[in-house]
Image: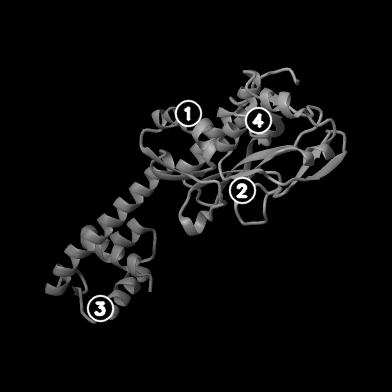
Amino acid sequence: MNRLRAIEVFVTIVDQGSFAAAADALGMSRNMASRHLADLEAHLGARLLTRTTRSHSLTSTGAVYLERARNVLAQLDEADRIAGLHTLTPQGRLALSAPMSFGVHHVAPYLGRYTASNPKVTVDMSLNDRTVDLVEEGFDVAIRITGKLADSNLIARRIADVQVILCASPGYIASHGSPDTPSAISDHRCLGYTFGHEGDVWSLNDGNGTVEQVRISPAVLANSGDAIEELAIAGGGLALQPDFIVSRDIAAGKLVRVLPQWSGGVLGVYAMYASRLYEPLKVRSFVDWIAELYRPKPPWIVDFEPK
């Protein structure tokens, strides 16, 4: 038995005044309307309507049940209305995960634009460089920066690219010199990123298909790209960092590129979310917005001459 349908039939019979009128209103046969009512009464173990050949009337049980049934249908209509609003207007809490440095410098400064355009959405941003589990941890969207996506059931939309740059401070270069080949990097003080996929091996390529693997012994390890940036500026050693952290420092002369013809490659910036099926409008609107934010040139790109 379709219980909700049977309740709807019962209320409509009372409102329309007859089985025939109710059947017409609901787009079903009179026999089907009678069957729904009979099934509902059998389920309840009580008669709701007293029938005669020409009319029907509510039993005392039916009168009490009618009031509750109207409330059930009204609440269902309200739930449908609210769900419909969520498909028309972005609203609700948007749980967002982003890497620490990227989130601080290249998401947070612009979030006011998104919330101004979507005043019914509250963004709850969590910054962490580890890879979060969207489903288990309850995130709607996660920003990930990687050279290779892990296999998963998540939807991944590439929203920007970042280049990984080898750099150091002018003071470090003045004191220790600059490596003239990738293999010479291992003779220098290096600053390692705890969450880096490269570990103690830096992979450099020249853009023409040549790749050099360089094993390093980090002088300092840090779990923050911003901390490594400050260490590098202070002369702590060579850093292999994404351009969204160091490009402005290079443009300002605080850092200089080392082996500028080589780089750590290009990584993708992805917006990750669970599924396109019944995708909440808040998720769709945010992903579209942040993808547009980084077009045609991401805000971290600063033109500078390689040194």
Q: Which of 92 and 3 is in front in this view?
A: 92
Q: Is residue 103 left or right of residue 307?
A: left
Location of residue 172 (image quadrant): top right
Residue 130 percent location from the top left of the image: 56, 50
Q: Earlier in the sequence, mark 3 or mark 4?
A: 3
Graded by Cα atoms within 10 Å as few (under 14), some (14 to 19) or many (20 or more), the crowding at tag 1 reads: few
Residue 67 percent location from the top left of the image: 17, 63
Whole-angstrom CA distance, mark 2 to mark 4, is: 18 Å
| Residue at (78% x, 28% y) in the render | 178
Whole-angstrom CA distance, mark 1 to mark 3, is: 57 Å
Task: Give the amino acid type for the residue marked by disc 3 in the picture.
Answer: Leu
Residue 173 percent location from the top left of the image: 72, 26
Q: Which mark is residue 44?
A: 3
Whole-angstrom CA distance, mark 3 to mark 4, is: 69 Å
| Residue at (57% x, 45% y) in the render | 223
Q: Which of 239 and 134 is in front in this view?
A: 239
| Residue at (47% x, 33% y) in the render | 108
Graded by Cα atoms within 10 Å as few (under 14), some (14 to 19) or many (20 or more), the crowding at tag 2 reads: some
Q: Nearer the viewer, residue 128 or 92?
A: 128
Q: Which of marks 1 and 3 is nearer the N terminus?
A: 3
Q: Mark 1 points at which residue?
A: 110
Graded by Cα atoms within 10 Å as few (under 14), some (14 to 19) or many (20 or more), the crowding at tag 4 reads: many
Outermost residue toward the front in this view = 175
87 relative to 181, above or below: below
Whole-angstrom CA distance, mark 1 to mark 2, is: 28 Å
Secondary structure beneath label 1: helix
Q: Mark 4 points at which residue?
A: 243
Q: Which of 92 and 182 is in front in this view?
A: 182
Q: Earlier in the sequence, mark 1 or mark 2?
A: 1
Q: Is residue 143 left or right of residue 121?
A: right
Residue 4 percent location from the top left of the image: 33, 66
Q: Mark 2 points at which residue?
A: 194
